[in-house]
Image (cartoon, coloured by chain):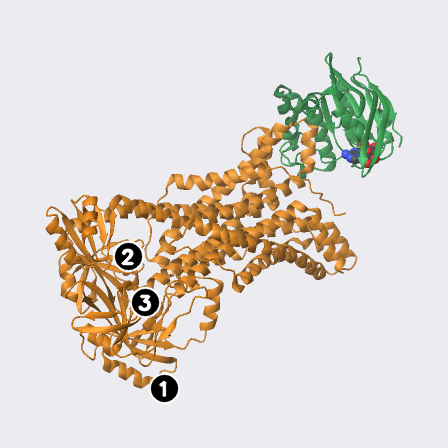
Amino acid sequence: MSAAISLKGVSKGFLDGERYREVFVDFDLAVAPGEIVAVCGPSGSGKSTLLNLVAGLLVVDGGLLNLRHGGVDYPLHTLDEAARGAVRRRLVGYVFQFFNLIPTLNVLENVRFPLALNDRDDLLPQARERLATLGLADRLDAFPDQLSGGERQRVAIARALAHEPPIVLADEPTGNLDAGNSEQVADMLWSEVERLGCVLLVATHSEAIAERAHRVVELGR
Amino acid sequence: MTLIGLSFLRFFRRTPWTTLTAALGVSLGVASTVAVHLISLAVAGALSTVGLPHLQGVTHLAEREQASMDDYFALRRQWRNGKLPDVVRMTPIVEGYVVADGRRLHVFGTDWYAAPLRGMNSGLTSSGLTGSNVDYQPGAVVVDESVGLHAGDVLTVGANRWSVAASVSANLDGGVFADIGDALQLLDAPADRLSYVGVQVHDPFADLAALLEDLLPGLSAALPEQSSTLADWHLRSVAAEQPSVQFSKSVLFNLGALGSLALLVAWFLIYQICVMWLRRQRIVMERLVALGVGRDVLARYFYAAVAALGCVATVVGLAAGYYLAHFLTELSTAGFDSVPRIEMSVAVVLKAAFSGIAVALVGAWIAFRSRTHFFEAAVPGRSAVHWWLPVAVVLFAVGILVPQSGLAGGFMAILAASLVAAGLVAPLLRGVRQWVVRLPGSLLAKLAMREVTWFESDLGVAVGALVLAVATSLGVGLMIESFKADFERMLDQRLAHETFIDLAGQDGLVVAEALTRRFPDADVQAYGRLRARIEGTAVELGFTRFDAAESARYGHEHALAENEALVSESLTTALDVGVGDTLRIAGRELTIVHEFSGFGDVQPRLLVDNATAETLYGQLPFDRLSVAGVPSDALLAWFGERPGSSPRVQQRDAMRVIALEIFDRTFAITNALTLLALLVAVIGLYNAITALRLNQLATSDLLDALGVNRSEKRRVDLLRGLTIGLFAVLLALPLGLVMGAVLCQVINPRAFGWSIELQLSVPAMLWPLGLGIAAAVLAGLAPTPRERLGSG
Ligand SMILES: Nc1ncnc2c1ncn2[C@@H]1O[C@H](COP(=O)(O)OP(=O)(O)O)[C@@H](O)[C@H]1O
Ligand SMILES: [Mg+2]
């Protein structure tokens, strides 16, 4: 297995009231290192669920889910919550649609957070540089409630990439922004991801974003 | 429209934890008030059965210098002529001492023929006041049970014999009550002798006062005493004639105040929960308003739903209070002689209902008023300083600086200080935010610490309640600790003798003489006491051989010379005198040379040397002895061989142990009540932290996504609790010190007549502070029930 992310025969469902609803049945996906994959599909098709499975926030009901980095396999389907958390902390950077930032930490602190968790303060200069690239150099002391929507998403990108993880997950990262901001944020995400050479799995409704991806995975209902 | 009410009730059911804790908090608050009230009722019932037979129906005593019977008749003429319209009844009274059979008798004479003496049944009766009147019989007397005679017995004084018509429990040592003519003969006094006049003054508010006393036991002792005049006589409330009753009432009022603390904290809790509910119901309510439902209609249903909750809490609290009362009386008899009987009454039920429902409603009302601005617009940051801040400061100053405000004024000051401190919590939390942001630490630590100051709208009220509970615990603890230190010092001084003997009616001089004959090496000292009056105020006059050693026991360095007196603090307060001043007593002048504390005295006290007492009163009754230099078993054996009543022989060390044990038991109830308030505060804090966490679910999910593990999250919880605890404790410390100082220097002197030197005992401070922090940490670490937030 050389794929950075590989899902084989994955099934996942939720208890919806009394009824059990399948979201994934015998689902396969392999993402190569450095690949940018857009996950598309209507609401409720399982985009977020897929990202959460990869992040180890959810567990597969059946099948295999493996992450690979630095020649080591991380079979998430076999790991317990604590172990999955440890993998996620190191290998994954996550950007959500909203509520991306910790309200009580300022911009720099939010970005330093993954560095502190991974004990990688050596990456702080790079992180600061990235913040500057993202146009946030003079917003380092600002708190999230003092930022605009676009600024917040840019901080979220800086935070997701701070510890330079091999896998970046973005769940509708521009879903909450107007077209102009959307474009700008996507540009920045792409250029940073490409610079670091990490995998980007981006769930999106936006065709513009899907077009930028190396590959599109379409989820049905 | 009832649908709206139902929707509120249903909402309670969907947030079972919040509802349960709200009900629990109010229940505990009600239980605390009910328990203290039940105990107070039982004690007050016991107190009211103790009455002075000759003061039946009398409300005031009228006095003047050197009064004689002629003065009385002059006063009576004025009354008959309609000049004193408020007076309902008046009776002349003589009072004096006579020593008979080596027993000191305290004689009272009234117009028995005109107004019957009231004989109280001895012991406690269920309904309290069941005394029966004893009709006038010529040549008969009524005696206090301490005299040891019963109806039909004969009392011999000098050459005269008096038949005993009844024995009563008047709680007056050696009390003998007779018709005024007989009393003058008993006392061998001139026929125109008059001590004072008993007056019944019409009080239009008497019924109201009685009702208030039912609702707030001890209140009468808490209100400032008014002195007034009647013609050119000085008028004093009859309550001062029974200082032990006043003393107990003061204890009750203190307990009552402390018992309401849990209720006050519960009020914070219900307010905070109402705010939480309103916030969660906000969308539904906005929609209802959009549909045309009036805001007042919403409010009415909200109040009704909260009142329903208050009702449930009241019922539970009533039952819990009943058991708590039993528990507390077993824990401590708080200064009462017998364990009081706990009985439910209408007043208790009313008080419980009022406490539970009113507390819930007021909380709901304020919450609704302050938190439903969303109907109009978003509330900008409200100003930190409220109008009530200066009001509270003024109330505090008045309560402390104006002695006329009485015990109630002292508690008003404490309440004002508490509300100021609690009200400052949220603004302070906002204020320290900038400062907290600069604190160093790991990012997780910063996150935890900042959340406390960031979300003050979730935490403010609960932290305020915690501040209050911790501060009270601290203030009361400091007061008790300081009191104990003073008390122990006093014990060390006063219990300087090896053995102390209470002679139970035997003549001290006779016993002392016999003792020194049997044990020539013994060092025996006799003590006696008399009830006396200075400027109309009843005081206890103690006398013994006041050599330097005896003086030292009261902290005075020299032997007492003739006409020198030591006085208790309560005497200097009551008469507004100090060291160096002179007192007029029985027509002579005494100089005050020293003031002592007088802990435990129920009445102002002055001490003089035997020589001085003799010039004042002639033959002196001695009722106690101290003995040194005789082995205690030899002493006991000697007393055992003597005929007559058996005296109480107490060893110094045993007395010390007993005294301290009584002290600790007295305050056990206090500690239990502050702990209860702390418990309610913890419930409130738990609720607030739960609300904070629910409002921060997004952050929690974010931390998950970042790979923050469970132990790190626990650390955040711990640190958040610790920060809350530290903040609360930092505010509670000054408030607690203020409370301690007010308790020692204002409440105690006003309630009991002695002030306490506030000692900043570190262990006494660490305990409540540590408890406060532990409580906050515990509330922070307790698992959060996941109640749905949505409106759905
Ligand atoms: N935690 C959950 N509990 C129950 N059902 C869930 C949960 N998460 C997702 N689902 C269900 O799984 C399906 C896929 O959801 P999701 O992955 O969020 O879709 P998308 O992101 O494509 O809109 C939906 O039907 C949703 O209701
Ligand atoms: Mg989604």
Residue at the location (25% across, 45% down)? B652
| In-front residue for pair A89/B763 | B763
- Circle 1 packing at 10 Å, graded few (<14), some (14-19), many (20+), is few
Q: Nearer the viewer, residue B549 or B291?
A: B549
Secondary structure of the residue carrying tag 1 is loop
Q: Is there any visible trace of residue A114 in the rendered image?
A: yes
Kind of element beneath mark 2: helix
Label 2 CA crowd tier, 10 Å (few <14, some 14–19, many 20+): many
Q: Quadrant of the N terminus of chain B?
A: bottom right
- Tell me which residue sits at (25%, 48%) in the image: B650
Q: Residue furthest top?
A: A71
- Distance from Cα at disc 1 to Cα at disc 2: 42 Å
Marks 3 & 2 on one chain: yes
Identify the mark nearer the N-term, 3 or 1: 1
Q: Residue B498 bears which disc, if any?
A: none
Question: Quick check: B743 left or right of A144?
Answer: left
Chain coloured green: A
Q: Give a yes or no on whether discs 3 and 1 share a subunit.
A: yes
Q: Chain of mark 2?
A: B
Per the image, label 3 sits on a secondary structure element best described as helix
Using the rendered image, report if marks 1 and 2 lie on a common chain.
yes
Residue that badge 2 annotates: B569
Residue bearing the label numbered 1: B82
Label 3: which residue? B241
Amino acid type at mark 3: Glu
State the image coordinates of residue A40 (x, y, percent, origin top left): 86, 29
Mark 1 vs mark 2: which is more N-terminal? 1
Residue B222 in which image quadrant: bottom left
**Which chain is rendered orange in the image?**
B
Please report contact status of discs 3 and 2: CB closer than 8 Å, yes or no: no
Q: Amino acid at mark 2?
A: Glu
